[in-house]
Image (cartoon, rainbow, N blue to C red):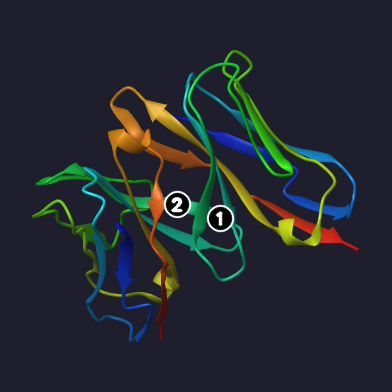
Amino acid sequence: ELKVEQNPLFLSMQEGKNYTIYCNYSTTSDRLYWYRQDPGKSLESLFVLLSNGAVKQEGRLMASLDTKARLSTLHITAAVHDLSATYFCAVDGGGTSYGKLTFGQGTILTVHP
Amino acid sequence: DAEITQSPRHKITETGRQVTLACHQTWNHNNMFWYRQDLGHGLRLIHYSYGVQDTNKGEVSDGYSVSRSNTEDLPLTLESAASSQTSVYFCASSGVRSSYEQYFGPGTRLTVT
């Protein structure tokens, strides 16, 4: 059974600082997705990582995938208040579960002035 | 523009009643999913479908059913609503052209009294 773990689960940052959210998963997969959710809203796709070594960047966020270590990171550079949200990683089960995603618990990010 | 919609957006019902939540997508995606989101549990998969006439149970399927009679719709039925089913429900869809990235609907907040 595929398990996905994120850490930290809660992250309080000061504006301007850098930090990384980690997403570990338990079985082989080469497809990983990052989502953002604002309070009371739906999930919004941030990144799609489809191969080992994939790196995607959008603004102050950069995501990477290491399929051998079964690890993805979401790096935040010079955080701003607008980045406050909950971030989820999700991993494709592959095989007969292709297209079915298992989600991490989510990381609640709060950026303070 | 293609989209995924859910209705109703809010629903209050009584214990024991049958409730159906609608999900409609115009992405022409083969895959559709139902999740529930509760504090402390993240997103949990209820049922999913890989195409017309195909349905599969997720990790929390007890008390729920789905049917897929066309590509666009995957209604979720709570056969006899229980207070434990008070939650926010999200529908999602994905397809090969989107690299199986799941697109989420706006959610339905269900309260069972």
The answer to whether A82 appears left or right of A51 in the picture is right
The reply to whether callout 2 and callout 1 are in contact (CB within 8 Å) is yes
Element class at badge 2: strand
Which residue, given by chain and number where applicable, does mark 1 sit on? B41
Q: Quadrant of residue B69?
A: bottom left
Residue A56 — which label?
none
Write down the chain letter for disc 1.
B
Q: Residue at x 33, y 86 (%)?
A: B14
Total labels: the figure holds: 2
The answer to whether A16 appears left or right of A76 in the picture is right
Q: Amino acid at mark 1?
A: His
Give how far across and how far down residue A3 sits, in percent.
53, 33
- Tell me the distance, in whole angstroms, between the alpha carbons under discs 2 and 1: 7 Å
Task: Pick whichever, B108 or B62, lies toward us.
Answer: B108
Q: Is residue A99 above or below residue B66?
A: above
Q: Amino acid at mark 2?
A: Arg
Residue B44 — which label?
2
Q: Is residue B11 above or below residue B79?
A: below
Residue A105 showing in the rendered view: no
Element class at badge 1: loop
